[in-house]
Amino acid sequence: MDSKPPSPEVLSMETSTRDDSYFRIRYNDKVKYVVVTRGTFNSDELCLPLYSLPPLPYDDDGWTVARVSRNPGSPQLQFVLENRPLQGVKEIWHPEQVDCLALKRVQRLTMNVSECTRKGQEAPQSTVIAKIARFEWEIPRIEQEGHVYRLLQDTDIGPQFLGHVVEQGRVIGFVLEKLHGKSASIEHRARCTEVLGRLHRLGLLHGDVNRHNFMVGDGWTKMIDFEKSKETQDEGLVKAELSSLSSELEDESGRGAGFL
């Protein structure tokens, strides 16, 4: 009996009825990208794209991006296949590289951050945090944050950087240790001031000091989410960030808490 062919799986999506929509799709051991031209599908069809897309040759290595559209006034879908290299992170400094398809999601934290286990390492203590660029326009933020983690190596200011995430030869993200702690509050002001001060003495501005970007545990305090961080010698920016800390630690709005 012939085995059933694999089914495509949507890994990431960014949809809009007023602009083009984008989909990152896994088929067996391949990842393909599909761009649906504005106006091709209605909102319901965009939410369930695999039922609406034409039968694309997902197993064909000869393309990376498919562009799907519809001629005005016609129900007939058409697509064009492109075989072009996709943008990836250029600053590759850690020796460990993790295949994105070897990561199994345990919990999604934000649109591009998840708790994951690695294939063959499903024990609870092996859970890691994976942050990826779902689409090419997110690569610069991943590149910037990876650069900051390089500067933070051996400082104990942030979680341990465990390696780069690779998708078909290009780096699209990274994996971090999972911190077993809780978000900071105003009672942790002294601890947060100390770790933020250490970051500033390295010549780095965090850029988003909301309370959820400070994690506290038994005897330790660390910072996370460095995608807005930058190198600076501007004392005014450093003082402004430090002076905002108390009000940020008192904030109970949930800003910065992801999907929580």
Image (tube, helix red, strand yellow):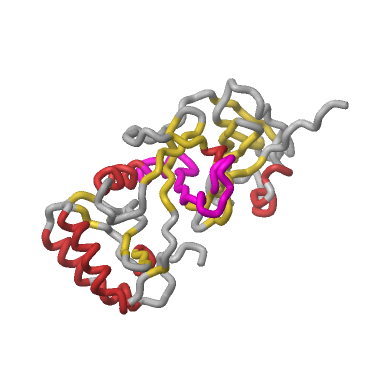
Residue toward you, 180 or 193 = 180
* Point 22% across, 69% down: residue: 193
- Whether the magenta-drawn stretch holds residue 130 is answered as yes
* Point 42% across, 32% down: residue: 87
* Point 22% across, 57% down: residue: 199
- Write the start and end of the magenta stretch as one range: 117-142
**Horizontal placement of 234 versus 69: left or right?**
left
Residue 154 visible (yes or no) = yes
Total of numbered circles in the picture?
A: 0
Residue 112 visible (yes or no) = no
Image quadrant of residue 60?
top right
Task: Locate residue 175, reporting x and y percent.
Answer: 43, 45
- Whether the magenta-drawn stretch holds residue 48 is answered as no
Specify the farthest residue to the top.
62
Above or below 185: residue 176: above
Specify the farthest residue to the right.
1
Image quarter where the N terminus lies is top right
* Point 33% across, 47% down: residue: 145
Residue toward you, 85 or 127 = 127
Task: Locate residue 10, reporting x and y percent.
Answer: 63, 43
Task: Locate residue 43, reporting x and y percent.
Answer: 65, 53
**Horizontal placement of 248 versus 253: left or right?**
left
**Horizontal placement of 47 versus 147: left or right?**
right
Task: Locate residue 181, reporting x and y percent.
Answer: 42, 65
Residue toward you, 95 or 110 = 95
